[in-house]
Amino acid sequence: MTEASNRTPRSGTVAGMKESLKKAVTEMMVLFLLRQKPMYAYEMAQELARLTEGVFTFNTLYLAIYRLQEHGHIAEAGKQESGNRIRVYFQPTEAGQQYLDDLMAEYHLMTAALDRLLEQDGRLYPAGEASNHV
């Protein structure tokens, strides 16, 4: 198998759409979970899988965590040593709380518009209506 065949297909496939959607909402989901309680990365991944009944699973959330931290949306809430591991807990900042509110508002606006559009399937144009572009 080549490296190209190991990658998830992008455009034109359901798998590609799913991957794009996951990437688009990762920051929102991380912030949402952290609004509930401070968590470390692996705990977030486990909770996300559990709470979405496996629909959203992430092998790693680290890139999103780094981006959110870099932009001041999350901060370390403490560290806990467990065996030979150090768990870094994160929590949203005030800016992160506002960013989450803004992301959720935009998400709801977009998904509601998409739902309204998709509800029109088969009813958008009268049957037999000729297109001017033919």
Image: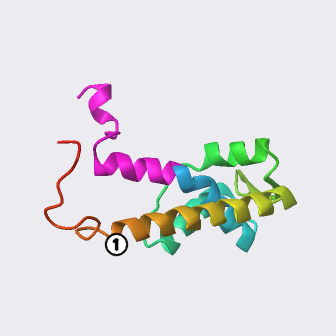
The chief SS type of the magenta part is helix
Magenta region, residue range: 1-23
Q: Is residue 19 above or below residue 1?
A: below
User: Mark 1: which amino acid?
Assistant: Glu
Q: Residue 36: horizontal and vertical position, in percent? A: 71, 73
The residue positioned farthest toward the left in the image shown: 128
Residue visible at 30% across and 35% down in the picture: 6
**Residue 7 in magenta?**
yes
| Residue carrying label 1 | 119
Q: Residues within 10 Å of mark 1 (few under 14, many from 20)?
A: few
Left or right: residue 86 compared with residue 110 = right
Residue visible at 32% across and 70% down in the picture: 120
Residue visible at 62% across and 42% down in the picture: 63
**Residue 3 in magenta?**
yes
Could you say which is closer to the camera, residue 107 or residue 78?
107
Q: Quadrant of the C terminus?
A: top left
Q: Quadrant of the N terminus?
A: top left
User: Residue 48's quadrant in the figure?
Assistant: bottom right
User: Is disc 1 placed on a helix, strand or loop?
Assistant: loop
Q: Is residue 26 above or below residue 10?
A: below
User: Residue 100's quadrant in the figure?
Assistant: bottom right
Could you say which is closer to the camera, residue 83 or residue 127?
127
Asked whether residue 52 appears in the rendered view, the answer is yes
Could you say which is closer to the camera, residue 11 or residue 133?
133
Asked whether residue 80 appears in the rendered view, the answer is no
Q: Is residue 124 above or below residue 62?
A: below
Left or right: residue 64 compared with residue 92 = left
Residue visible at 26% across and 71% down in the picture: 123
User: Residue 122's quadrant in the figure?
Assistant: bottom left
Q: Residue 95: horizontal and vertical position, in percent? A: 83, 56
Left or right: residue 90 compared with residue 4 = right
Q: Residue 50: horizontal and vertical position, in percent? A: 50, 72
